[in-house]
Amino acid sequence: MRLAAAQYTVTRPLYSEDAFDKDHDKIYRQHKTVRDHVKAYFTCNSKRAKNAALSLFPIIGWMRIYRIKEWLLSDVVSGVSTGLVAVLQGLAYSLLASLPPWYGLFAAFFPVITYFFLGTSRHISVGAFPVLSLMVGAVVTRLVPDDGPPVNITGLEGLTMDQQRVVVAASATFLMGIFQVGFIVMYLSDTLVSGFTTAAAIHILVSQLKFVFGLVVPGLSGPLAIIYTLEKVFVQITDTNIADLVTASIVMVVVFIVKELNDRYKAKLPVPIPIEVIMTVIACGVSYAFNFKEKYKVDVVGKIPQGFEPPMAPNVEVFQQTAVEAFPMAIVGFAVAFSVAKVYSIKHDYIIDGNQELIAFGVSNIFGAAFKSFAASTALSRSAVQESTGGKTQVAGLLSAIIVMIVILAIGFLLEPLPKSVLGAVVIINLKGMLMQVREIPYLWRKDRPDCVVWIVTCLASILLGLDLGLAVGVGIELITVVFRTQFPRCSVLANIRGTDIYKDRKDYLCIYEPEGVKIFRIPSPIFFANIEFFRGKLIESVGFNPLRVLRKRNKALRKIKKLLKSGELQMTDKGLLHTGSAPIEESEDESNMEDLDQPTDFQNLPVQINWNAELPANICVPKVDVHSVILDFAAVSFLDISALKGLKTALKEFIRVDVEIYIVACDVYILEKLHSCKFFDDEIKTSIFFLTLHDAMLHILEKHPDQSEGEDTNTKIVPYNFHGNQSNGRGILRIREVPDTETKF
């Protein structure tokens, strides 16, 4: 048995904006000036000081609710596991930055300490990130190349190549941190980040081939650097060190298989198998036992100094040389970290603060750079270890930093025989997630082709032009797609869904009704200088005629009628105008005075009322207009600029001057205020054209044109309400009720 639909009844007057304002008192608020905002911003009291402290140091908030019995053991296990991975990845990613391996340990320690106090995410693992490391490496090799002298920079004289590169990397990181702290908010779409990181993964893969094959390939940067690097690798492919290749291949196969098993059985495993750490320990032992460095000429990590190095001041001249690269580094570092942080905040139901994250990463990079660390962000694989092993808070991150500190201070020498090919293999295996993002292309092509274009262009540009220029190209393409989406949106003509007060695109539904002579045009985006002409064109297309052309034709016809009446060739009769001339009047094609033709004509001076849609005498032809009312749906219009306002006013006047009534519905109150302040209204365009809802405007039109209120079936009204006119005030009462499914009347 079919259940009856729920019923409701609403009774209210038919409201235009003017009528609504008369019936409902409005609170007029005084808008704050810039001075008021500045004064409020710098006003300080105890409450604001407390809130500022809690905001700047989130640790105060979450440490007060820390559950020692429930969370501490999980954080300890997670911290130890993450620390071991951080040590290995720090060594590996420092090779991407073209720095001695042990400097990667500094990147896994100092930024973590700072983020512990300032960060709002409880689960991300801060430290070296392969994409950032590669971008740092591009800067380092440009200023301190493998072959040839370094760039002339004061402060690099007398230093070894490694020391020069450390100064460059640390100074660029310091500048990157300054950029991050200086940001307010920076948005990059997920599509752009995906395409960019996929391209970065390809760069990283190519950069690690020299370690896997045991070749000597200088670091290259700039456009087409990846092509030149591949060329050098393949030219030397016959010089491959077999020991490096075999070692790297074994490590990659084993790590890949175990990682797949970890993913497949993660629900059953208490903690993921730390296969990278296990293979690193085995590789160190085998390399030491068989003396890989001497017997097989394998390039190993080598001497790892114990202890931290003294802090250093950044080099200002390096700032000047690296500002162009440091800016995209700041963007990428924050965008990736914030994206990962959002994933875990949603999963574990807590809030992260984007502005505070910028401050946290900016200060972390500034602090780390002072102690010779290079750019830090977060890596998805390392953060996944911290979260999947049970990490609850950044206490796990602090413990991972303690593990790194133990390696730096005491047991770093154990990693000295580790082959660099093993580090390269670990880096390549960890690229799987970024490389597999290429599978998004078919989905994006089916669902959102502009986004697909952004992904492909960003990826290709980043591969061929380098990561910094590629990111700039990607941002440019993304902005272009936004402009095109707003400049050429999908406009639509709406129609009434029978039996309701709902209006939908007439192309999408069968059971619709369009009153004759009424067009409802929906504008689905803001209107501004770039799209106002597009909207005017779409509006003309939807109504089926150009009002400016009709107005010109009518004015020309009116001049001829006046001329014929004056000459006696045209006479006024009871039936209208009668042509008594012997030949038809030829239309003049002279439109030199176009401005006069565009102006409204005073028809009161004519002794007869002209029906422009009827047949005119003397072969005078004027386009017929079968539309008497046009409704513009402004529900999706969020703003109007001055150029659009002028263009809109011109378009409305063109319709009004050809006797087409214009109505605007669902207009935002702030747009209305702007229209008033910009003197939009005059003798032709009045405030009475604005209505609260689309259906209010439709009922108003049907009241003015009662012959349109009946459908093809005389028993079926098009109005989906009981409508009772009120002749005393010219307004109606809407009685809204849902009609049972068995009824056919509206």
Image (cartoon, rainbow, N blue to C red):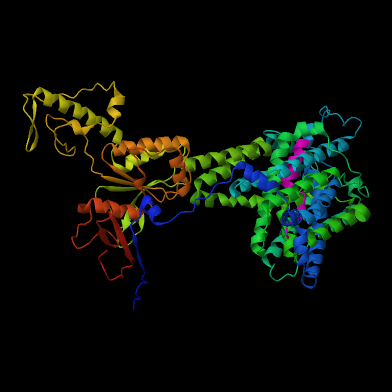
Q: Is residue 384 magenta?
A: no
Q: Is residue 255 left or right of residue 716?
A: right
Residue 284 in picture, x, y percent from top left: 87, 54
Q: Nearer the viewer, residue 692 or 427?
A: 692
Q: Nearer the viewer, residue 441 or 417?
A: 441
Q: Is residue 519 left or right of residue 383?
A: left
Q: Identify the residue shown where x is 82% and y is 43%.
A: 369
Q: Is residue 133 magenta?
A: yes
Q: How many marks?
A: 0
Relative height, residue 581 to residue 313 (above, below): above
Relative height, residue 389 to residue 582 (above, below): below
- Residue 329: name its quadrant: top right
Residue 331 in picture, x, y percent from top left: 68, 43
User: Which stretch appears magenta?
Assistant: 122-139
User: Can residue 218 be seen?
Assistant: no
User: Can residue 360 be seen?
Assistant: yes
Residue 323 in picture, x, y percent from top left: 73, 34
**Quadrant (top left, top right, bottom left, bottom right) of the N terminus:** bottom left
**Quadrant (top left, top right, bottom left, bottom right) of the C terminus:** bottom left
- Residue 651: name its quadrant: top left
Relative height, residue 592 to residue 231 (above, below): above
Residue 226 in picture, x, y percent from top left: 69, 37
- Residue 81: name its quadrant: bottom right
Q: Nearer the viewer, residue 337 or 550?
A: 550
